[in-house]
Image (tube, helix red, strand yellow):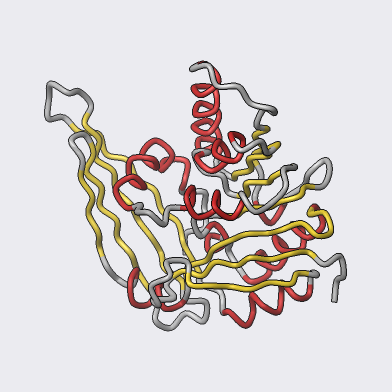
Amino acid sequence: MNFQNGYDNFAEFYDTLTALTDDEDCPETVYTKLLTKNERGILLDLGCGTGKLSLAAARMGFDVLAVDNSPNMLQAARERFSKAVNSGEEFAFDIQFICQNAAQLDLFGTVDVVVCARDTLNHLASKSEFEETVRRVSLFLNPGGVFYFDVNTKQKHREILGNNTFTYETDNLFCVWQNNFDDNSAVFAVDIDIDFFSRQNQNTDLYERSQCSFTEIAFDEIFISEILTRYGFEFNMSDYYNDGSNAKLLYICRKTGERN
C-alpha cells in the first residue's frame, strides 16, 4: 500500500483533473449549501487541497484555517487566495495555511466548523489514524460545532474504482489513472497510480511525464458510527450524490460536548 504523500506531484494537475471529473455535486457546491445554514465563525478546512473550498468559505465570511499534509497543495491554495486578493477582492479574515497530517492535527485554539471534503479521510492509513483524526477534531471543535465530511464506501472501492483504468485528456495534459483493488483486504484498499503527461510548449508535441501514487481505504459504516459516537458526535448520513448509489456518503455531525 502506498501511504506516502503522493499528492505533492498531483498538486500541479489537481484542478485540471477535478474540472474534468466534477459535476453539479462538486464539494464547493455541496458544502457551501450546508455552510449557509450556520452562523459565521472559525472554519477548519481539513485536507484543503488547492483551496477551492477554503476560498469559498472565506468569501462567505468565515475565518478559515486551511490544513493539508502536502506542501505543494498548500502552495497552490495560497496562490489561489493571493490571486483573489490581488484581483481586488476583500475578505474579513486572511486564510491561515497549516501543513499537518489530519491524524496529527494540532491547533492554537478551537473552531466552530470542520469540513473534510473529497474523501480525505479515505487517505488515512489505518483505523487507528481515523479514530485519532476524529478525536482531534472533537478536541478542537467547540461544543455545538458541526463536522462535515464525505467518504468513499466499500461499494465504490469494489465496483467503481476496482481494478479499473481511467484516462483523461485536455489540450495540454494526458492522464492515466490505474487502480489496484485488493479483494482480500479487510479494509477494502485501492492502490492508485497516476501518470501525467503534460505538454511543455504550445508549439511542440513534447510531453513531460510525472507520477503520483497513494492508497485509499474504505472504512466500515459501523466502525465510523462507533468512533463518532465515542467522541461525542450526534450525526446523520446521506447518499452524497442523491442517486441511490451509496458510492459516497456525506456525514453531518454535531458535537454534543459529551464523550462516551
* Residue 183 spot, x, y in % from top left: 39, 81
Q: Nearer the viewer, residue 243 or 194?
A: 243
Q: Position of residue 42 (x, y in %)?
A: 74, 42
153 vs 199, left or right, is right
Q: Residue at x 68, y 39 (%)?
A: 62
Looking at the image, is 248 positioned above or below residue 48?
A: below
Residue drawn at the location 68% of the way across and 69% of the way down:
128
Image quadrant where residue 159 sits: bottom left
Image point (34%, 68%), residue name: 161
Residue at point 49%, 47% (across, down): 28
Furthest residue toward right: 258
Residue 200 in which image quadrant: top left
> Looking at the image, is 245 positioned above or below residue 52?
below
Residue 49: x and y, percent? 52, 43
In which quadrant will I find the C terminus? bottom right
Q: Position of residue 50 (x, y in %)?
A: 49, 39
Is 98 left, or right, of 209 in this rendering? right
Relative horizontal placement of residue 217, taking residue 198 as reference (left or right): right
The reply, left or right, for residue 93 in relation to residue 191 is right
Frontmost residue, 80 versus 239: 239
